[in-house]
Image (tube, rainbow, N blue to C red):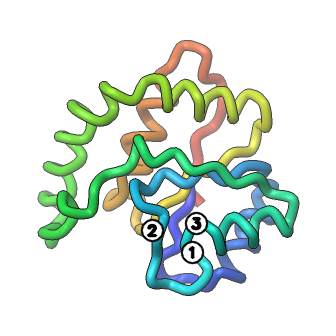
């Protein structure tokens, strides 16, 4: 998984290249960003220019209204506990879709904003996908 908080588009893309990422899977509910280069169409164009496919799966994201009052790690922990009990339970089809991408392309990165993996839903999402019986890959946060 990879977050883009605190790094430039160039640094972000270089990480994707360094880790030989073949598919970038955007797991934001709304793939919009105030940060240059990270809105859906810009990011897709930048990735595809490097031979990296871009896929957006908004169903596995968290709506912005649920992220408004996050101040301490305990707030994030509560949000992710609710996410695990709701969204992750209702998006098994989309998680299988992500797993299919992993099987087909081997090198897939889930992306969202937060640099700190403990403050991003990428972590519980990736962990959920890794619990599927056919998951046989290394999970890394870059």
Question: Quick check: 120 left or right of 79?
Answer: right
Residue 68 screen position, x and y as percent: 17, 69
Residue 16 screen position, x and y as percent: 73, 63
Q: Is residue 134 above or below residue 105?
A: above
Task: Identify which residue is drawn at 74% across, 69% down.
Answer: 45
Which mark identifies residue 89? Answer: none
Which mark identifies residue 40? Answer: 3
The C terminus lies in which quarter of the figure?
Answer: bottom right
Callout 1–callout 2 Cβ contact below 8 Å:
yes
Ranked by sequence position, the earlier of labels 1 and 2 is: 1
Task: Identify which residue is drawn at 46% across, 76% down.
Answer: 33
Which mark identifies residue 113? Answer: 2
Callout 1–callout 3 Cβ contact below 8 Å:
no
Task: Identify which residue is drawn at 61% across, 15% down.
Answer: 134
Q: Is residue 81 above or below residue 133?
A: below
Residue matched to label 1: 38
Residue 102 screen position, x and y as percent: 69, 34
């Amino acid at each position: 998984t990879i977050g883009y908080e605190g790094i430039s588009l160039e640094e972000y893309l270089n990480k994707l290249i360094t880790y030989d990422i073949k598919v970038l899977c955007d797991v934001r509910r709304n793939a919009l960003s105030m940060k240059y280069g990270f809105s859906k169409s810009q990011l897709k164009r930048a990735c595809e220019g490097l031979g990296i496919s871009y896929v957006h799966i908004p169903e596995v994201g968290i709506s912005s209204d649920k992220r408004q009052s996050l101040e301490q790690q305990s707030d994030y922990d509560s949000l992710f506990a609710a996410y695990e009990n709701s969204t992750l339970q209702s998006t098994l089809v989309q998680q299988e879709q992500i797993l299919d991408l992993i099987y087909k392309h081997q090198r897939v990165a889930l992306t969202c904003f937060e640099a700190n993996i403990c403050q991003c839903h990428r972590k519980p999402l990736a962990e959920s996908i890794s619990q599927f019986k056919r998951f046989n890959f290394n999970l890394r946060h870059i």
